[in-house]
Image (cartoon, helix red, strand yellow):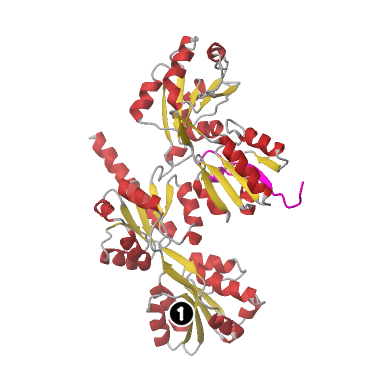
Amino acid sequence: MSASVGMVYLVGAGPGDPGLLTLRGLECLRRADVVLYDGLVNPILLRYSKAKAERTCRVSAGGERHLDQDEINQRLVAAAKLGKIVVRLKGGDPFVFGRGSEEAAALAEAGISFEVVPGVTAAVAAGEYAGFSVTHRDHASAVAFITGHEDPTKDAPSLDYKVLAAFPGTLVFYMGWHRLKQIAESLIGAGKNASTPVAVISHASWPSQQTVTATLATIAEQVSLAGLRPPSLIVVGECVQQRERLAWFEKRPLFGRRIGVTRADEQADTQIDRIFELGAEPVLMPTLEIDPPETWDSVDEVLRRIDEFDWIVFTSANGVRALLGRLWELGGDARRLAKARLAAIGPSTAAALSEFQLRADVVPESYRAEHLAAALCPQVSGQRVLWARANRVRDVLRTELTAAGAQLEEIVVYQHRDVAVWPDEVNQRFVAGQLDWIGVSSPAIARNVARLIPEPARSLLGGQIRIASISPVTSAACQEVGLPISAEATEHTWEGILSAIQWIEQEDAQRSAGLSGA
């Protein structure tokens, strides 16, 4: 095979929770030139890759939904022949009802090197996220994975429901939502007790997960009443009874809530991870982009004389990474800062300094420019102070430090640029009311949120869609542009925003419980 031929990785993405991607899968995504992902993959995972990504959509033919597998196989081969590293990202595990083996066969036939990266298969995750194990010493010593949707081109079905009805363990049906009633009736007709416990789990491990439990006799009706939609799995067996005691995922404090993250994309990773931990869905709706300065000339000039400064002040993690990253690119390192004391506006900024093995000398108790200025002013009279900042800032720090006698020099090390429009999927969520909270972490973001919100959604603000602000200054900016505040952080960080949302949600839950009790 030519040395120019690339490599294909068939990667299992897990069932939905991005934390279930394997380390090997993550490594492959980071190396990829091209990613072809299927419709069951959480698109959040694409943040780990700089590759060109394309969704392989389901198409309709003769009323049946299917994947155009031959076309996907051809595209994998063609991309590899161009010398590309290709990741085929598949929901769950690539081989367990995932048709990954067909893709592997096509690659083998074409002489393309490939690797299969197993993923957490949906059946295992669905049970565990719903609160039960599909095997258990008291309930099931075996488990069967079964397709609920056989190949329609087969001459005759392969499933023998008499064998399945007699199976001494748990039955898990993939892709069976459209045939739930027939599956239940077939099992009962083959001798399975109609009172056998059944669970249907929709969108397993996603914040939108729904679980319905019933018996074989009643499950179809209960699922219909609950309005469950695919993708889903059907679990049949005594193990389902564990759910009452062991359900954990749906008890997370913000389970099912949809929270808008308005930070720049490159700043949002920590917030995304935390929102998932709380059981909510992060909705990426950046209002700002972070760019380098138009030119580094001014920054480079300051860095050549960085050892002249007594203090270096940082008011964001971006400022830390921009200034110190540029210092490294120019061949310098932290030793050039030996003379200076360092000030950080808050813990996130101090944490960015620690990435460069530096400790902040000053971090105010409240993470606002006013409090940073108050902490610095008694110490900076007659001192040379460098402020590494964005192109747009408030005047508070400049005014207060200059009045305190500091010889202040400011340098723009990165730029904020306003996002012109949100992606269509964000606007569609607004119009459909598929959003519960929007986190707003600066006055600039407040103004941009107000500008970008689609007009039909404005009537939902303060009611169905609520605003959580990071600080009183940001709350004031929100109110100026017509964004009603429902929650305000006491700790002026994104963690504070999420804590404020939790407090309001708990209050709502207690109020609802009181009303229902009355």
Q: Which amino acid lies under the numbered mark 1 shown in the image of this protein?
A: Leu
Q: Residue at x 57, y 56 (%)?
A: 50
**SS at mark 1 in the image:** helix
Quadrant that contains the C terminus: top left
x, y (%) of residue 354? 58, 67
x, y (%) of residue 347? 49, 65
Most foreground residue, 7 or 208: 7
Q: Which residues are magenta?
A: 1-21
Q: Is residue 448 above or below residue 400?
A: above
Q: Is residue 6 above or below residue 515?
A: below
Dot 1 crowding, Cα within 10 Å, few <14, some 14–19, many 20+: many
| Residue 455 seen in render | yes
x, y (%) of residue 138? 56, 20
Write down the residue under mark 1.
376
Most foreground residue, 27 or 318: 27
Query: Is 6 included in the stretch rendered in magenta?
Result: yes
| Residue 461 seen in render | no
Q: Is residue 514 left or right of residue 93?
A: left
x, y (%) of residue 496? 41, 58
Q: Residue at x 44, y 22 (%)?
A: 180
